[in-house]
Amino acid sequence: MHTYVVLAYKESKYLEECIKSVLNQKYKSNVVIATSTPNEYIYSLANKYHLKVNINPNPGKGIGYDFDYAISCGMTKLVTIAHQDDIYDYEYSYQIVNKYKKYPTSSIIFSDYYEIRENKNVYSNLNLKIKRILLSPIRINLLSKTRFGKRLVLRFGNAICCPAVTFVTSNIHTQDIFKCNFVCDVDWFAWEKLSKENGKFTFVKECLMGHRVHEESTTTEIIGERIRTKEDMIMFKKFWPECISKLLNRFYVKAENSNNT
């Protein structure tokens, strides 16, 4: 019913820890690897844990295209893109599958998360507090089923952590969920697209996975270059007039700075 697609890129020193976490689950899911950068390091770990490696036949188009390819590698109703730097707690897939059984019309099911900074689990900081406030409406079952409710949790920023999301592929009627020219906000772009379609956004309030924040991460690099600020502005304008979008964007930069503190 559920597959983890571990999205591997080059030679991450955290890849093996990610693989171990998705194999060590209360609910035993399928696990495969997807990559646009095949190399001996990835193959050696795949062989060690007896995992299939799926090679993207069209590499280099962008992060969004890599994500869409990864989803296509999962041959089950539920697919989680496991980012190579992150880890999943023992009950992640168990609770996700149970939520799906309770809410089978969901398009995405996602959990709360904690950050991993310098090998320490951080459950609260400014960034996480803001995101949890933004997600408050989705806790109301009635709102999480409506276009208004789904867009409400997105209009003030991207509060949904991409690696914490499981896609209910049978309820998503497009193969281009992430397809765009963005570098960073590909996930916010995807949630905005899905918010206009049928399907509930189902939230699991427990922190069930850890998102690693470190100097080598793509997120940190992008924030340093302020690419995200430009893309945030584009996304805000999908929900607000330009004058309000500018105000929100200035505020959101403060949350970005949490990534470097």
Image (cartoon, rainbow, N blue to C red):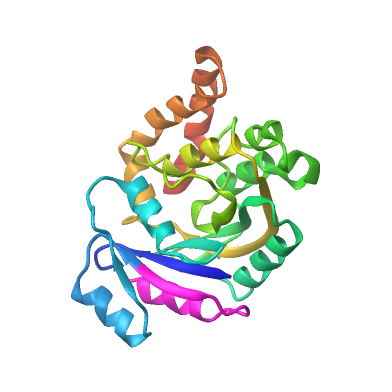
Q: Nearer the viewer, residue 138 or 245?
A: 138
Residue 258 shows up from this direction: yes
Residue 126 drawn at (x, y percent): 58, 45
The residue positioned farthest toward the left in the image shown? 40
Residue pictured at 29% horizontal, 45% vertical: 62
* The image quarter in which residue 192 lies: top right
The residue closer to the viewer here, 93 or 20, is 93
Q: Is residue 166 left or right of residue 33?
A: right
Q: Which residue is found at the position 37% from the left and 79% from the top? A: 51
Residue 168 in view in this figure: no
23 is within the stretch colored magenta? yes
The spot of residue 89 in percent (x, y) is 58, 72
- Magenta segment includes 84: no
Question: At x 57% / y 78%, what residue is drawn?
Answer: 25
Q: Is residue 174 above or below residue 148?
A: below
Instruction: Name the residue located 35 percent from the left edge and 55 percent from the top edge.
Output: 217
Number of marks drawn: 0
Residue stretch in magenta: 13-33
- The answer to which quarter of the image holds residue 50 is bottom left
Q: Is residue 161 left or right of residue 150?
A: left
